[in-house]
Image (cartoon, helix red, strand yellow):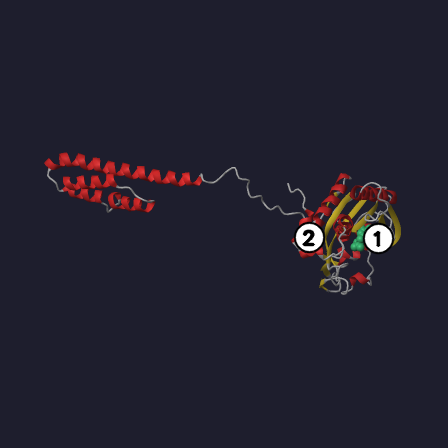
Amino acid sequence: MQTQIDQYTAEVNAFHPANADELEAFRIKYLGTKGLIKDLFEQFKSTTPEEKRTLGKVLNQFKQLTEARYNELKERFESEVSNSKSDIDLTLPGEGFTVGSRHPLQLVRNEIIDIFKRLGFVVAEDREIEDDRHNFSALNFPPEHPARDMQDTFFIEKNGHNDVALRTHTSSVQVRMMEQGQPPFRAIMPGRVYRNEAISARAHCFFHQVEGLYVDENVSFADLKQTLFHFVQELYGDGTQVRFRPSYFPFTEPSAEMDISCTICKGAGCNMCKYSGWVEILGCGMVDPNVLENCGIDSEKYTGFAFGMGIERITNLKYVIRDLRLFSENDVRFLRQFKTEVI
Ligand code: DAH
């Protein structure tokens, strides 16, 4: 047994593994549960007490030597692996992240919200699937109004008393808001709306609107004009002119459409403004007393104004985009042009 231990000791001392696999084989051979050292301890049991005295010490020394050798080699391999990692040049510039950009409609929507927030308007949102009451009847639409036709509106359910449809405008959110409380209301309501239109450069089956509503005591048409005038100066810059033309909406009386001086040609005439110098950007008016009453609000005590604008329209004028389809095609070459700082 002594000679065997001597031979193993020489082998262990001479062991120089080329890789971690060889080291592992070494561990299994000597230190494993079925390894040579285990074997030697088995043999040791059947030696005489005389032999035990000397062999015990030798055997333990051999075991310690093998374990120490193994640990030393293992450490060397591990540090070699981590040294090789430091070949990476940490001073090289990193590979920058590709940062996305906000959708132009989202940018303009946020800008509109910011302007009105500064005037004390809150943001309200509501459902896109609406019933007849909130999309039409509470807003004073007569039963035979063309918007109630399948040709103009996407109906989900036609049941003859309270049809269900994709909302055709965000004015429905006015009704939702007013029937839930009492004035004062001062809110803007952005959202997506749907109309049964063939898709072209100038029309789409869905688009986005921002609705505005201000109801309180003594709200007048002058408040409406001043609010919208301020909004336009903020959005398109000081000096942008506005004009109001009489119009008709079932839910406002009186009603108007607001034009601004063409932002592209500054009123000189171009094909964006069809050489008139003016472009229409929104509809507005004083909330019809019938609408207030339909929502449980005393029209003797309260008055209000409302307005509604298409976000696509506002965006087209801001960025000179002439084809509505670009907004929903998700072509990154188009979207990338609106890079903004993303925080
Ligand atoms: N709902 C109208 C539309 O979709 C826009 C509108 C016009 C909203 C006048 C209003 C308003 O609140 O007062 O064309």
On the image, the x and y values in percent for residue 278 come to 86, 50
Please rate how many residues cluster around mark 1, counting C-alpha atoms within 10 Å: few if below 14, some from 14 to 19, many from 20: some
Query: Is residue 123 shown above or below 128?
Result: above
Q: Is residue 311 left or right of residue 93?
A: right
Viewport quadrant of the N terminus: top left
Q: Amino acid at mark 1?
A: Cys
| Percent coordinates x, y for residue 227 in the rendering | 82, 42
Residue 57: where, in percent of width, then height? 18, 34
Relative to 46, 111 lies left or right: right
- Can you see residue 128? no
In this image, 120 relative to 226: left or right?
A: left
Q: Give the image location of residue 233, x and y in percent.
A: 81, 42
Q: Which mark is residue 270?
A: 1
**Residue at 63% across / 47% down in the picture?**
100
Label 2 crowd (10 A; few <14 / some 14-19 / many >=20): few
Question: Can residue 325 be seen from the camera position used here?
Answer: yes
> Does the numbered disc 2 mark a residue whose Cβ is under 8 Å from ligand 1?
no
Element under label 1? Answer: loop
User: Tag count in the figure?
Assistant: 2
Tell me the tag on residue 334: 2
Q: What amino acid type is highlighted by mark number 2?
A: Phe
Q: In what quadrant of the picture does the C terminus appear? A: top right
Towards the viewer: 145 or 20:
20
Q: CA distance from mark 2 to mark 1?
A: 23 Å
Query: Residue drawn at (71%, 56%), measured in percent from left and top?
Result: 326
Element at label 2? helix
